[in-house]
Amino acid sequence: MAARYRVMESLGSGGMGDVYRAWDEEGGCQVALKMLRTKHMPNSSLRQRFSREIDILTRVTHHNVVQVFDAGFHREQAFFTMEHIDGKTLRQHLASGRLSAYRSLQIVAAIADGLRAVHDVGVIHRDIKAENILVDNRGTAKLMDFGLAILEKHTDATRLTGVGQIVGQLC
């Protein structure tokens, strides 16, 4: 990984990992590099969530869902790369002012299209919120952060969240 990806800057942190803007030396483009924090590596449940996020994202190909390019381990640290989006989260857009009704409908329709593609491959996102929707500089909305997503066909025995257990944020 160190030879292929050159970290340029931090883009943010989530519950399980950190995201960086990186340069893909092999692909010749910018990517977003998400790495599971090393303190979480001994936690098998979080490693499974991270692996499941990669598995789920590689199942979905849609212009309103962030696309994964590569995944693996480097010195025992799990990582994956996805398309880098120049833009802001929907939360950031909303903080800078009210959206018009037309623009709001465009974003809702785009995310609904992305969710349809996600559901078509049997995935339930479970964490739709303004922080998990990116709007690029051309105005395209993209769904991201599948860390809490599940596959519809998973039985109770293969779920990583117990019945009645709350994960994520309560908005």
Image: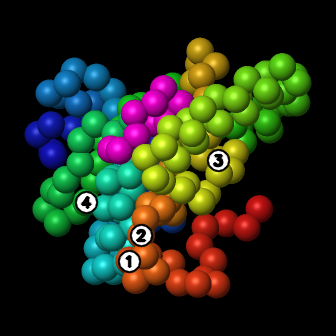
**Would residue 131 be counted in the magenta stretch?**
no
- Amino acid at pointer 3: Glu
Cα–Cα span, label 2 and label 4: 23 Å
Asked whether the beta carbons under mark 3 and mark 1 sit within 8 Å of each other, the answer is: no
| Residue at numbered disc 3 | 131
Using the image, tell me which numbered label, if any, was put on residue 135. Answer: none
Asked whether the beta carbons under mark 3 and mark 4 sit within 8 Å of each other, the answer is: no
Using the image, tell me which numbered label, if any, was put on residue 78. Answer: 4
The secondary structure that most of the magenta stretch takes on is loop
Looking at marks 3 and 2 on the same chain, the residue that comes earlier in the sequence is marked by 3
**Position above or below: 41 against 108:** below
**Would residue 60 be counted in the magenta stretch?**
yes
Quadrant that contains the C terminus: bottom right
Cα–Cα span, label 3 and label 2: 26 Å
User: Closer to us: mark 2 or mark 4?
Assistant: 2
How far across and how far down the image is residue 142, in percent?
A: 56, 33
In the visual, does 100 lie left or right of 59? right
| Residue at numbered disc 2 | 154
| Magenta stretch bounds | 58-66
User: Can I make out residue 157 in this image?
Assistant: yes
* Label 1 secondary element: helix
